[in-house]
Each structure stands twice: as structure tokens, then as C-alpha cells.
Amino acid sequence: MSYTVPKLKDFSPAALDKAASALLAALEKESASLANEADRKAFRDRWLARKDGVLTQINDLWLKAAPKDGKREVGQRVNTLKKEVEQKVEATRKQPAAATSDSALDISLPGIRRPSGAEHPIIRTMNEIIAVFRNLGYSVAEGPVVETDYYNFESLNFPPNHPARDTQDTLFLANQESKPPRERLLLRTHTSPVQIRTMEKLKPPLRILVPGKVHRNDPPDASHSPMFHQVEGLAVDTNITFGDLKGTLDHAMKALFGSDVKTSFRPSFFPFTEPSAEMFVSCFICGGSGKRGADSCRPCKQTGWIEILGCGMVDPNVFEFVKCNGYDPEKVSGFAFGMGVDRIAMLKYGLDDLQLFFQGDVRFLEQFG
Ligand SMILES: [Zn+2]
């Protein structure tokens, strides 16, 4: 090893050029003499080792030693140099091992490609939604996917035999007839049970976001799946009003879909909120016109509005179930909302078939890398 990193006294551009080209010449020479894997490893260590590699040395001897007014210039040069060295060293990794005899190795064989992974579009969308609410001070809460009837229905103001249960085709676990109804296990039909579970553990005030998988007995088609994803939100404090709900969700939708989207609330019904509403956002695909050029806009069905979530003020009956932990409906109020992540991801990425998300086809998924 003949090359050692010199200490610099002169930091002028010309001197730096000279030092850099001496370094690159040494790199070139050493890389040309690598005979086997052990050589290549020693070569990598010598140039890239964090502790005492050449790159670390130029950082110490050149960059750190540079005079204050020249640091910027030297820093830029050292960075460029680092990149060149890293590329060169990386390139030697790809050299085929030297053949021991003419027939031992077929260098025409293609190499082994390691595909890099990507975040699944649903997880990515979920994380985007979470990030918006984290900035508003919400924390993330999670709960079990296999849930009891009590948490999934009863404590959310769905009494036994309440007709609202029929709207959520529930998948129950088999052979539980001997258990009392409220203890029977099912696959949660919404993320809302985590509202009660969290209020049992934490006293008000509370602001949580609940992402997760939910299940319903829906046969798979372009817009349904027996497994899908929701993000649920809950805020409880004193004096929370419907105005807080509207302000929070309007802000969140602008953060998610662009600052020019409008929101609209229309009355609805959910057992665990009163009053309840469905929230629509102005179509961010056609800009609310209902048209795309000469064609009609399919995602908003030409209405200019897209239904995006359900929400409402927490029903006092729900607080009754956690009253002993400080949720006295006379003293606290709150709002809750829930949205389907899969549909939002379809809208964001312009897909018309929900099943694409769950088929695990790499050709589809790698587009999101
Ligand atoms: Zn539209």
C-alpha cells in the first residue's frame, strides 16, 4: 500500500485538485490489482472503513483541517471525491471472481438481482393520514383484530338484536354457543372497539388515531373485500363541539388532498355518535366540476363530491360504559370519525379495482417503489 492520505497545508483549488487526482490515481491502481474476494474485501475496508478508511481520513485531514473561510469549498470537493470513491469501490463488488481455469466460470450468466422493497400503497396512505393527525397532537392506539361482541357492538351502543348490526355482516368465530353473547369472539367489523378499550385505560382528555385491519362478510369484488383497512379518530375533552369536529376534519382533508378541496357534511346515522354525519370532499380529480374533459368523472359519479368518512359527536350512551374512568357525559364531550383507507388509496392512485392491493402481484406493487 503505497498511498497515504497527506496532510494539507495549502487549501487552494489548485492544491486540492492535485491532492484529489493523486488519491484517485491510487484508487484506480489498487482496484486494478484485486485478484480474489479477500482482496476485494481488504480494498473496501481500506477505502470505506468507518474507523480509519481513506474516506474517513480525508474527512479528518482535509475537511476538518481546512481554514474556516475555505470549509465550504473543501467540503464540496470532499463530497464529490467521496462519491467517486464509493462508486469505484462499489463497482469492484460486481466484478466476477477471477476464474481459476478457463472452464470454471461462465461469466455470461446473469447476476442475481435483489429487488428492493417498497411500502405497500395502503400502508403508505395510512401513514400519510396518521402524519396529518400526529401534527394535530393525536397519538396512535391499536387493539386486537379478534374482538368480543361487547367491544365491537354492545359498548358502542349497538344493543343485542339492534337492527344496525345487520349493516355490518359480521364474521363470528365458530363453536361459541356456550359463551354468554357479549363474550363471543368475532373479527372486528370496524376499528371503533379501540375507542372503548383506550378510554378504559386512559383518562380524558384524549386524542387518538386508530389504524388497522377490519373484516366483514363481503365477497371480494372491485370495490369490496372481506378484509380492509380503517383509520378511526377520537377526541374527548371538556367543551368539544361539532365546530371542533368540522375544523379538524376540514384541515385534515386539505392536508391530505390539497388546500383547495372543500368539505361538506350531510346528516347520517351511526349508533355510537349523535348527531352523525357523512363528510364529502370536493372531487380532487375533476376539481369539483364532475367532468374530465368531454367525459364524466367516474370517481365522483359526476357529482363533484366524494364521500370520504363518517363522523359525529360521541353518543353520551357510549361514555356511560367508561363513566367510572372519568368520562362523565355531563362533563366531557367528544367527536369520532372513521375512514376507509383502501378507498382513499384507490382514489389517490387512480385505481378502479380494490383487489389489486391484495393479490400480491409484484408487477403491480413495484410501481409504488
Ligand atoms: Zn370528480
Image (cartoon, rainbow, N blue to C red):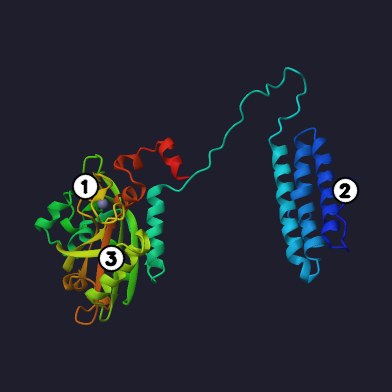
Q: Estimate the x, y position of residue 190 in percent, counting from the top left.
A: 25, 56
What amino acid is labelled 3 in the image? Answer: Gln
Name the spot of residue 226 as percent of width and height, x first.
25, 44
* Element on which disc 2 rests: loop
Quadrant where the N terminus sits is top right
> Is residue 53 visible from the viewing direction of this image?
no
Give the spatial CA distance, label 3 vs label 2.
Answer: 65 Å
Q: Earlier in the sequence, mark 1 or mark 3?
A: 1
Q: What amino acid type should be assigned to the residue bearing mark 1?
A: Leu
Residue 157 location, quadrant: bottom left
Query: In which image quadrant can residue 140 be found?
Result: bottom left
Residue 60, above or below 346: below
List the residue tagged with mark 2: 3
Using residue 174 as the reference point, say whether residue 285 is left or right of it.
right
Q: Residue at x 71, y 33 (%)?
A: 95
Numbered label attached to residue 222? none
Q: Which residue is mark 3?
A: 195
Q: Callout 1: 10 Å neighbours few (<14), some, many (20+)?
A: some
- Determine crowd level at label 2: few under 14, some 14-19, many 20+ residues with C-alpha closer than 10 A: few
Kindly report the distance in space between the C-alpha atoms of the residues bearing marks 1 and 3: 20 Å
Residue drawn at x 68%, y 35% as measured from the top left: 94
The mark nearer the N terminus, 3 or 2, is 2
- Quadrant in which residue 265 is drawn: bottom left
Of 84 and 363, nearer the camera is: 84
**Amino acid type of the residue that numbered disc 2 sits on in the rendered structure:** Tyr
Calculate the distance from the C-alpha at mark 2 to the C-alpha at mark 1.
Answer: 71 Å
Using residue 362 as the reference point, say whether residue 342 is left or right of it: left
Q: Position of residue 86 (x, y in %)?
A: 71, 47
State which tag comes first along the sequence, 2 or 1: 2
Residue name at image x 77 percent, y 48 percent: 47
Secondary structure under badge 1? loop
Q: Which residue is mark 1?
A: 171
